[in-house]
Image (cartoon, grey):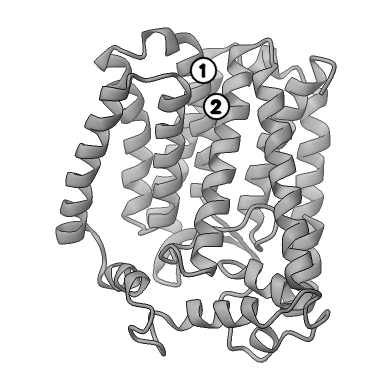
Amino acid sequence: MFASAITLLSIAPGLFYKQLIWIGLAAIAILGLPMLNLKAIFSYRWVILGLYLLSLISLLAVSVLGTRISGAKSWILLGDFQIQPSEFVKIAIIILFSAFFASRHVSIKRYSTIIASFVYFIIPGVLVLVQPDLGTVLILFGIWFGYLLVSEIPFRYVLAMFAALAVIIALAWSFGLQTYQKERIIGLFKPDYDPLGINYSVIQSKIAIGSAGFFGKGFGQGTQSQLGFLTAKSTDFAFAAFTEEWGLLGAFLIISAFLLMIYRILRVGLFSDNNFFKFVALGTAIMMLMHFTINLGSDLGLFPVVGVSFPFLSYGGSNLLTLSILVGTIQYAAKRRSGF
């Protein structure tokens, strides 16, 4: 969280103080949630379903009250702050799937179980896709598919899903994706395609990372980020902006800290004595790894840019609060058992 604030102080001072407010709310979530009796709260089915329904209502509200930013109608403006409801959907999905698979993972071989879980994913997935926000849809899909894998779904089912996914991708390319989304995918396989348009940001990101050296150019001295060559430097390309100023050493420390956090989350999940919280930890780790992989891959030109943030580094209060609520929930699970 503080790495995010330091980066913003350098590249986007105007966002620095806003992020401090979000960091304060995130700290309350991380420190406050372990003090509640979350086991009792989530033992009520209506609480879990209520969170899920509330998340769907928030997505519907975006279609009416939302503000279009960068081509996507994904935000609701509250004064000077932008709220992205699709981020909080991730909490609802993880909580719902944790309860769902905790009681049904032994029956994962049944088609009814897989279909029911898919319905829970596809409803918010479609609502987010029409915004359009392909990045969040990919994260939601990754969460759903990750839960199936950790529930030990039979391998033949996995093969069938990949075949179905291939058909869906073909249909999406023909009928679902916007022109700019197709061009981003084309740019992924053709690095020299439209260097002043589609591939411009990725090229600048590679320059920022490649020119950083071991110790970086120094705080506030990044040429690509400070001179405006690197677009979305506080969000999609926050890692590139950070690396340019703090070097490969800083990048190594950020990645190491992230992987250590994932290790701790997985350890809490694996040693939890409660299946629900075990799945919450595993689902959170899956979501964070999806964010990390897609964002880092986008900055390096390995994945198309789809607007996925780097956990705890990119600017964005909704995403930061979402992550913090999940981490606070996992802290509660860790508190229930010693040795973490």
Residue 123 location in percent, x, y?
Answer: 33, 37
- At label 1, the amino acid type is Ala
Q: Measured along the vertical axis of the image, is residue 141 above or below residue 67?
A: above
For the point 38% across and 78% down, the residue is 191
Look at the image and tell me whether residue 16 can be seen: no
**Which residue is located at x 82 percent, y 51 percent?**
24
Quadrant (top left/top right/bottom left/bottom right) for the C terminus: top right
Q: What separation in Å lies between label 1 and label 2 (alpha carbons)? A: 6 Å
> Which residue bears the numbered disc 2?
95
The outermost residue toward the front is: 214
Quarter-of-image position of residue 31: top right
Q: Which residue is mark 1?
A: 99
- The x, y position of residue 273, in whole percent, is 68, 10
Which mark is on residue 154?
A: none
**Amino acid type at mark 2:** Ile
Q: Quadrant of residue 197?
A: bottom left
Residue 311 visible in this rendered orientation of the protein = yes
Q: Give percent across and percent down for residue 225.
A: 66, 83
Classed neighbour count for the residue bearing mark 2: other residues with Cα under 10 Å, few (<14), some (14–19), many (≥20): many
- Mark 1 surroundings: few (<14), some (14-19) or many (≥20) residues within 10 A: many
Q: Secondary structure at mark 2?
A: helix
Establish if 211 lies above or below 69.
Answer: below
Closest to the observer, 67 or 5: 5
Q: Which residue is drawn at the image coordinates 60% and 36% (left, top)?
A: 285
Relative image position of residue 215 (x, y in whole percent):
81, 75
Please tell me whether mark 1 sits on a helix, a strand or a loop: helix
Report the number of numbered marks.
Answer: 2
- 253 left or right of 180 in image: right
**Tags 1 and 2 touching, CB below 8 Å:** yes
Instruction: Identify the residue shown where x is 77% and y is 74%.
Output: 214
Image height of 257 relative to 273, above or below: below
